[in-house]
Image (cartoon, grey):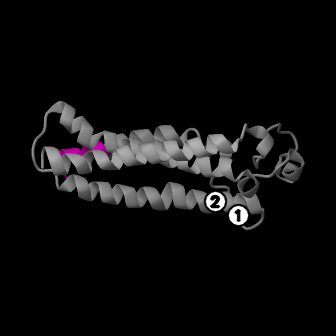
């Protein structure tokens, strides 16, 4: 591995860890209710695609793109080529959130009474989230999808453009 790949992987891991801290309240991987509760099933399927498959493909692509970088760069160029691509981690979260906000009826129960059976007796926090727990609006969902495209697009295009026009 070259310096750019290592820098990318380090920052991708840091950004991924930061992004993951926002997930627990959404229960994206609600495996105990998979195939037992329709919204949880759809959320798990979306999560597997958005948080496992797409990032895996992205990281593999980025490692390949960065492997083509052989010229030693200045600090600024190193950051542009190695760190900027790692920001895509936030884009995957924005994409997931945007889809959930655009289609809340598919991914979350409408009301608390639909998820009461999944709530422990002496606990005030439901095990399964419902729409009333969040301020969901389709416009925010659309904006989150746009932000996801910007995050992932800039992250992907920066090293590609540097390979083409800047520093081989």
Q: Position of residue 114 (x, y in %)?
A: 87, 52
Residue pictured at 76% horizontal, 47% vertical:
127
**Residue range corresponding to the magenta coloring:** 1-8
Local SS, label 2: helix
Residue pictured at 86% horizontal, 39% vertical:
122
Give the total number of marks visible in the rendering. Answer: 2
Q: Is residue 92 left or right of residue 60?
A: right
Magenta-colored segment: predominant secondary structure = helix
Indicate which disc, 2 or 1, sits on the residue closer to the N terminus.
Answer: 1
Q: Position of residue 102 (x, y in %)?
A: 67, 50
Quadrant position of residue 131:
top right
Q: Is residue 93 left or right of residue 130?
A: left
Choose between 3 and 74: the one closer to the eye.
74
Residue at label 2? 44
Answer whether residue 33 is magenta in the image: no
Cβ atoms at labels 2 and 1 below 8 Å apart: yes
Local SS, label 1: loop
Q: Position of residue 115 (x, y in %)?
A: 84, 51
Q: Check residue 61 in the rendering and tell me which mark sits there, or answer none.
A: none
Q: Is residue 48 left or right of residue 123?
A: left
Residue pictured at 87% horizontal, 49% vertical:
116
| Residue sitting at the far left | 71
C-alpha separation, residue under disc 2 versus residue under disc 1: 7 Å
Residue at label 1? 34
Residue 2 seen from this side: no
Choose between 10 and 107: the one closer to the eye.
107
Answer whether residue 5 is magenta in the image: yes
């Amino acid at each position: 591995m070259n310096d750019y790949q290592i820098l990318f992987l380090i920052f991708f891991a840091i950004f991924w860890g930061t992004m993951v801290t926002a997930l627990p309240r959404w229960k994206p991987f609600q495996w105990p209710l998979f195939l037992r509760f329709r919204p949880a099933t759809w959320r798990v399927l979306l999560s597997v695609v958005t948080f496992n498959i797409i990032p895996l493909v992205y990281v593999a692509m980025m490692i390949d793109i960065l492997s083509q970088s052989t010229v030693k760069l200045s600090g600024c160029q190193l950051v542009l080529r190695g760190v900027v691509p790692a920001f895509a981690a936030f884009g995957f979260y924005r994409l997931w959130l945007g889809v959930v906000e655009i289609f809340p009826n598919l991914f979350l129960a409408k009301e608390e009474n639909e998820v009461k059976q999944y709530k422990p007796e002496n606990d005030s926090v439901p095990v399964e989230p419902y729409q009333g727990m969040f301020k969901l609006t389709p416009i925010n969902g659309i904006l989150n999808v746009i932000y996801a495209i910007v995050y992932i697009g800039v992250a992907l295009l920066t090293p590609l453009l540097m390979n083409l026009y800047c520093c081989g």
